[in-house]
Amino acid sequence: MKVKFWKIGLMTSVLTVSLSLPGFAAGQWFADEWKQEDGNWKYVENDGSIATNSWRVSEDKKNYYYLGADGLMVKETLLEDNGNLYYVGSDGAMYVNKWKDFVDADDPNVTNWYYFGNDGKAYKSASDKATPRLINGKKYLFNGDGKMLTGLIDASGNKVEPSTSNKFVETVYYCGEDGAMYTEQWYKYDQAPEPDLRSQLGQREYSDYGIMWMYFDANGKKVKANTLDYAKTMEINGKTYVFDEYGIMMPDISVSNATVAATSSNAKYRYAAESADGQIKKDYWAFRGANDVMSEEDYDTQEFSWFRTNSEGKVLKNKIYSVYSRKYAFDRLGRMQTGFVIMYFDGSFAQSYKVDTWSRADFLQPAATSPIPAIDRGNLYFFGADELNDGSMKTGEEVYVDIADGRAVFGFKPSGIAYGSGSTLVRHRNKFYYNGLRLDADEDLGYGIVKDTTQGSNNTWLVVDRDGRVVKGNRKVLKDGSDSWIIIMDNKFFARVSASESPNAPKFRNDGSYWTYDSSFKGNDRFLRKITAADGDDDKNDNNFVVFSR
């Protein structure tokens, strides 16, 4: 039936009556009694007048009935009395603790449901604030007209209109098709959001989300962040989830402190995997792209990186961390770093470089003129260049790296810090390192010299081989790949003589000197020229022969 509204006055005092209606007894006509005429019931007041526009109660006080303007009992009607709605059934009795549906007066295709409480009043939202009502163990919402609400509901208890853009923004509650409010339930928002709307906490446009989820708590209220300082975290069924300022669960890498610049070491990130229904993943590797605030460049180029979470689901960042006995470096955003990495002396992340960014000559530059930024402000490390398969810290005295000008050997302490980090010459196990680079002789020459400027060395020149090993000896003569003779005296470089000057190996004489030597001559004539250290200095100008001269 269509809704029929009766405008009625204030309810008068309740009187005891005796009727043959349910709850009434038939009897003689007296004042303050019910009277039936032509199948219609009236109520006679004490003064003999007929009650109109008022309620009267049955003798057993179980039911109320309403008398209309003509004094007749009203039946099957939705009544409005003093701003409240009531319904009387086919027997005229007021509905109490009952549901009732009505065809909408303006749209015959719409059915509205009402619930009449213990006092007979229809439940309504009051004072522009949604008021959940508990009915048979479930919660429901009603608008200001008493109509049960379904779908997305705003804070005022009004249905969010279908024409509203981004309805999830205004949504505070959700009621299913049966009207039952969602409590401790997930809701999938499957309507395409406007492309320009973005989450400040998630730092991404909602149109980038593949799936959008909202969660309603035990009170039926949407879970959301209350400020733009921190995202809302909530444990649901033993798993932790993150929600933004509009109540959308944040998938993937998200900023949970949006007031701090994304490059700040104070920025906080969490990872939630869509593949795992969005819960925060703990002790988890994730290969994901950063959002545009974390890294605009990565976002634009769709550059993906590895992220790692700890036991709390927080992304590891700005430090070197151990994961399953291996060590990994993470920048301020939490991206795992590969290649050469510099960590500031306080352990925080400074810079990283691809392995082929710098040449051998670049690594050998002093800190003041080095093209490698931050080389003098932190420690140099090396992490596996193949980020898809490894990316862990490399240590050892013989780490092969394909730098800009070919393969080179580097050395790293058990801690991961490069031998000679910070543009310092270091001698370790009879080999020299500078910024981690092992000072090996030229491959073709086979031998080279290093100026030992380490503490207590007196800046002496030492001979090294292809493996960077210091060649020791006294009165030792070596031949390099250019047919030059190298003389070692007292474990130190003495001279280098071209084969054109000395076709045979130089000879040591008992007077303590070396001479160029040619066996084709006889006697003392075989000793052609005395070799001095000064003579050998000229040969140190060969750039390939001099490995390190600073």
Image: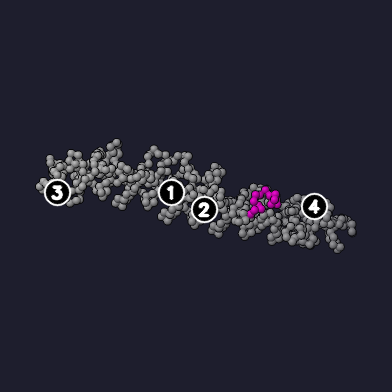
Foreground: disc 4 or disc 2: 2
Q: Of helix, strand and loop, which mostly describes the magenta segment?
A: loop
Foreground: disc 3 or disc 1: 3
User: In the rendered structure, which amino acid carries the disc numbered 3?
Assistant: Ser
Q: Is residue 423 visible?
A: yes
Q: Earlier in the sequence, mark 2 or mark 3?
A: 3
Q: Secondary structure at mark 2?
A: loop
Magenta part of the protein: which range? 365-378
- Indicate whether residue 43 is drawn in magenta: no
Against 74, residue 23 (above or below) is below
Residue at the spot of label 3? 18
CA gap, disc 3 to disc 1?
A: 58 Å
Residue at the spot of label 2? 315
Way the structure is coloured: one colour
Few, some or many residues within 10 Å of mark 1 (<14, 14–19, 20+)? many
Which of these two is toward me, 489 or 2? 2
Q: Earlier in the sequence, mark 4 or mark 1?
A: 1
Residue at the spot of label 4? 539
CA gap, disc 1 to disc 2?
A: 21 Å
